[in-house]
Amino acid sequence: MEMKKSPRARGHLDRLVVMVAIALPLVLSACQKVTVPSHIAFQSNRDGTDQIYWMKADGTELKRLTNDTFKNEQPGLSNLGLKVAFRSNRSGTERIWSMFSDGSGLAQLTDLDGVAAPRWSYGGQPIAFSASGPDLHPNIYTIWSDGTHLKKLTNASKDNVEPSFSPDGKRIVFTSTRNGMSDIYVMDADGSHQTRLTTDPKNDAEGSFTRDGNQIVFWTNRDGNGEIYIMNADGSSQRNLSNNPAFEFEPICAPETDEIAFQSDRDGNPEIYVMNLDGTNVRRLTNDPAVDRAPDWR
C-alpha cells in the first residue's frame, strides 16, 4: 500500500530541495582550481647589493622583497608564489632562507656550507638545493620548508648542482660534472635512478621541466656562446631555441603556459626575458643598467 506524505513532511522535503539547489553551485565553485596571477622572482643589484625582486609575468608591478644590506640571491618560489626560498649571508655565512612573498616571516632553513639554487616542489614540499656541506664537492639535498627532513640525494665525487622538480614532483633534473664535463641528469625525487641525458663535449647545465613534464629546457655553450636549448625528457631531440649571438642562460619554464623566462645580454645589459617554448615572441621584462638575473616563475 502506498504511503502518503503528510503536508508537513512534504514541506520539509521541498525546503531541502531548495537548500541543495542553492548550495550545490557554491560547493562546485569552491572546488574549482584557484587562479593565482603569475609572477617571476629574480635577483638584481640595481640598488647596490643583490636583492630579491618580483614582478608580474608581463614585467609590470615590480616590487623589492628584501630591503637590507645583506646579499640575497637565487630566489625560488613556492607553488602558489606565497613563499620565497633564497640564499643569503645575513647570518654571516651563506645559508638557505625563506620568507613570505611580501618580504615578512624571514626564517633560516639550512646550516650547510656552500648552498645554492633552492627550488620548490610543485606540491609544496620539499625544497631542493645544492650544498657542499662536509663534502669537497656540492651535492643535491632536499629539506622541508620548516627546516626539517633534510635528505642528501646525491653522493658523487664531482659537482651536483641546480636541481629542479618535474611538475608532478616525482623527478628532479640537475647538473653534474661526474663524467668530466657539465651535463644534464635526471633522477627520481628520492635520489634513485640517476640518469645522464646529455653527452655533448661542451657544457650543458640549468635544466628545467616544461609544464607537462615531457621536455626539459637547458643552457649550453656547445655553439660557442650561451644558448637556450630544449630536449625531450629522455634526452632526445636536442635543439636550439634562442639562436642569438648574445650570452643567454638561467632558463626556467612557466608553470601554467608554454613560455620560458631567462637571462640575456642581447640588448647590451643582463636583463630578464621571456619567450615562447618554440623560441618565438621574445620580449624583455626588465630594463635597468644593473644586472638582473636568476629568474624563477610561479
Image: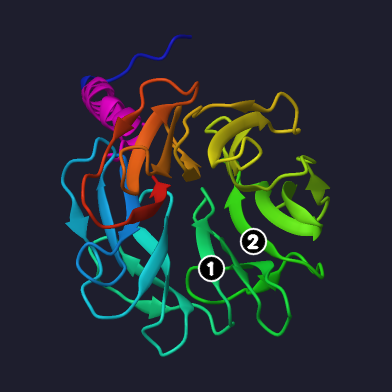
Residue with the most extreme bottom position: 92
For badge 2, the amino acid type reads: Val
Q: Quadrant of the C terminus?
A: top left
Q: Is residue 23 magenta?
A: yes
Which secondary structure class fits the magenta region best? helix
Q: Is residue 150 visible?
A: yes
Are the residues tagged 2 and 1 within 8 Å (C-beta)?
Answer: yes
- Residue located 32% across and 18% down the image: 5
**Residue 209 locus on image (x, y percent):** 58, 39
Residues in magenta? 8-37
Residue 294: quadrant of the picture = bottom left
Location of mark 1 (residue): 116
**Residue 65 locus on image (x, y percent):** 24, 64
Residue with the most extreme top position: 1
Residue 155: quadrant of the picture = bottom right
Picture disc at residue 139? none
Location of mark 2 (residue): 161
Q: Is residue 213 visible?
A: no
Label 1 crowd (10 A; few <14 / some 14-19 / many >=20) = many
For badge 1, the amino acid type reads: Ala
**Residue 231 as seen in the image, left or right of residue 58:** right
In front here: 155 or 107?
A: 155
Residue 292: quadrant of the picture = bottom left
40, above or below 109, in the image: above
